[in-house]
Amino acid sequence: MAAALVAAGALALVGCSLGDDRKVADVTLPELDTTTTTAPPQRDDRRGRGGDGEEAPPAPVWTLQFGGSGDDVPRALSSSDDRVVVAGSTTGELPALVEGAAARPVLGGTDVLVAHVDTEGELVSLQGAGTPADDVALGVAPNGAGAMACGSTGGQLGSTVGGSLDLWCGLLDEDDTLAGVVQLGGTDSEVATDLAGDPEQDRLYAAGRVGGLLPGAQDPTGRGLGGGDAIALRLTADGTPVWARQFGTPMEDASTAAAITPDGDGIVAGYTDGDLGRSSSGGRDAWISRFDPAGRQRWITQIGSAGSDVIHSVAVAGSAARGTETFVAAGTTDGSLGAGDDAAPPDG
């Protein structure tokens, strides 16, 4: 496992090995001289783990810290058999990795940052892209030929400009530079917040939020649209949009996470301040929805407490057969999510 962290204004990438059945890892921030250990609750399990039933946590395999002259923030990570791709943002000049080459200057307030690290922890490339406005990468995923990133731009990162803030998706070429950027914008602000793909499938799914109307988008719920809505997009492997679905309530809604199922459906998750999947439980509820490759919304379920609940990431687990998968989501709450809040999605 590798995790991207922020340490003292630079990026720190840590490679950790995990035990077979005890998910324990140490993560060290070198500049801050601190270590965080993550572990599940202790079990009364003494099978080959010593007299007290405990197992020593593994040490990091490698640690890599890199960055430029400004603030460098990792926002997303994608891994394959031979590399790790980190996408995020930078506010400063990025150093050249080739001796004698010029450093890459910052183009705007915030630029897109993309780094390629091999499985031995060596920094292979460090690239940036941007406009005179603010640009950021918020998602990255494999696409068969390599990887694709997505995010938001306040300028013209692609061929067209929509509103004050547009979403974008772009390929990372063999040099890990951003190429073939597709920029989508409507009447207000649009952001692509996450991206999910499968190297074996010719499709990707993006999650995001819009402040106005996204051109060409459909509303699968038929509930009408509010000031801030969730969006789900299906993209081809080269970033071409196949369809876009904009959905929400009269209140604030957004999709913040995406995943892809083994049979090619898209999972998006996020938050709502209204009644999106059922009656609201409180101020802000979490939700998860499933779309098929044709853009049909199979189901949507809303989960919440009396407080504020937001899903930040989602993954598919369990059986690959449709209707039997398990969807694991992580997020935040300032309320109390109990057993009665885990409404199951309908079959299919």
Image (tube, rainbow, N blue to C red):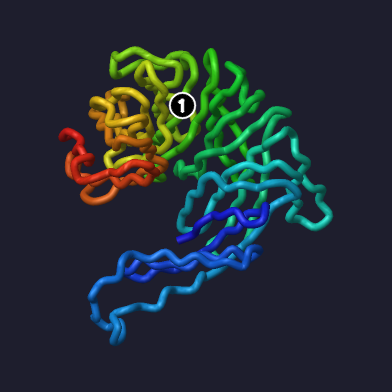
Quadrant of res 208: top left
Tell me if I can see residue 159 in this picture. Answer: yes
Q: What amino acid is found at the position of numbered circle 1 in the picture?
A: Arg
Quadrant of res 32: bottom right
Q: Position of residue 139 (x, y in %)?
A: 50, 40
Name the residue located 63 percent from the left edge and 54 percent from the top edge: 11
- 81 left or right, relative to 179: left
Q: Which residue is mark 1?
A: 209
Quadrant of res 336: top left
Name the residue located 36 percent from the left edge and 40 percent from the top edge: 259
Residue nearest the viewer, comparing 92 with 120: 92
- 296 left or right, relative to 330: left
Q: Please, is residue 244 above or below residue 25 in the view?
A: above
Residue, far bottom: 51
Residue nearest the viewer, comparing 237 with 17: 17
Q: Please, is residue 310 above or below residue 16 in the view?
A: above
Q: Secondary structure at mark 1?
A: strand
Q: Position of residue 275 (x, y in %)?
A: 29, 23
Q: Please, is residue 26 above or below residue 274 in the view?
A: below
Q: Position of residue 74 (x, y in %)?
A: 57, 48
Image quarter in which the C terminus is found? top left
Name the residue located 45 percent from the left edge and 16 percent from the top edge: 227
Residue, far left: 347
Tell me if I can see residue 16 in this picture. Answer: no
Mark 1 surroundings: few (<14), some (14-19) or many (≥20) residues within 10 A: many
